[in-house]
Image (tube, grey):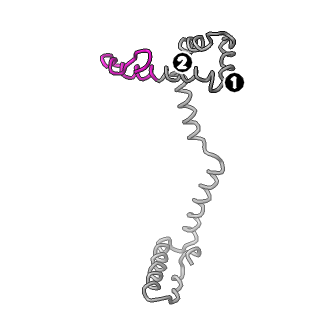
């Protein structure tokens, strides 16, 4: 329940009641947090007072500030800007990241092109794995070289 008496349970009869009550609670919470900036973030609070043409020396600064926010502040527009900013941040990818992705793809493509037969890459890997397992079971005997025509990077 919010301090203004908006309860989500009391709003269920209206189709948008629940969502509206939750929205109002979050809006009120946000405005209350902004009013607390008077002590927690005084320089930001004074800058906001200047922009809203409120005298920062007045005795009733907090109620004036809260009243202006409740009248003029569009919480939904603020939320939309935050979501838009977050989506933009997630889409913009640093050029170094693109470079590394291209390097990794280039490495895999190079391995495919160097091989005579790409299916032999798997054969060579299984060949090495089999010899490693035999070395472990029988003792340390030297492993045989992979068959000719396999990738150079697997030798």
User: Marks 1 and 2, how far apart in space?
Assistant: 23 Å
Q: Quadrant of the N terminus?
A: top left
Residue at 44%, 81% in the rendered image: 133
Q: Is residue 10 left or right of residue 130?
A: left
Taking 106 as reference, is 85 above or below it? above
Q: Which mark is residue 94?
A: none
Residue at 45%, 84% in the rendered image: 136
Mark 2 crowdedness (10 Å alpha carbons): few <14, some 14-19, many ≥20: few
Q: Which portion, as a residue range, is magenta? A: 1-25
Q: Which residue is mark 2?
A: 74
| Most foreground residue, 140 or 88 | 140
The disc, 1 or 2, on the residue closer to the chain's N-terminal end is 1
x and y percentages locating residue 40 in the rendered image: 62, 26
| Most foreground residue, 108 or 100 | 100
Q: How many marks overall?
A: 2
Determine if residue 106 is in view: yes
Q: Which residue is mark 1?
A: 43
Q: Quadrant of the C terminus?
A: bottom right
């Amino acid at each position: 329940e919010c301090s203004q008496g908006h309860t989500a349970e009391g709003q269920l009869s209206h189709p948008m009641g629940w969502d509206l009550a939750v929205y109002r609670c979050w809006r009120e919470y946000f405005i209350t947090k902004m009013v607390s900036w008077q002590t927690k973030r005084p320089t930001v609070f004074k800058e906001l007072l200047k922009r809203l043409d409120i005298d920062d020396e007045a005795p009733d600064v907090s109620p004036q500030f809260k009243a202006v926010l409740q009248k003029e502040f569009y919480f939904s527009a603020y939320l939309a800007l935050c979501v838009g900013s977050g989506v933009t941040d997630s889409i913009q990818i640093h050029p170094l990241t693109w470079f590394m992705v291209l390097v990794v793809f280039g490495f895999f493509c190079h391995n495919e092109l160097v091989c005579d037969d790409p299916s032999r890459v798997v054969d060579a890997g299984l060949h090495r794995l089999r010899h490693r397992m035999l070395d472990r079971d029988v003792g340390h005997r030297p492993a045989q070289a992979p068959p000719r025509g396999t990738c150079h990077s697997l030798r």
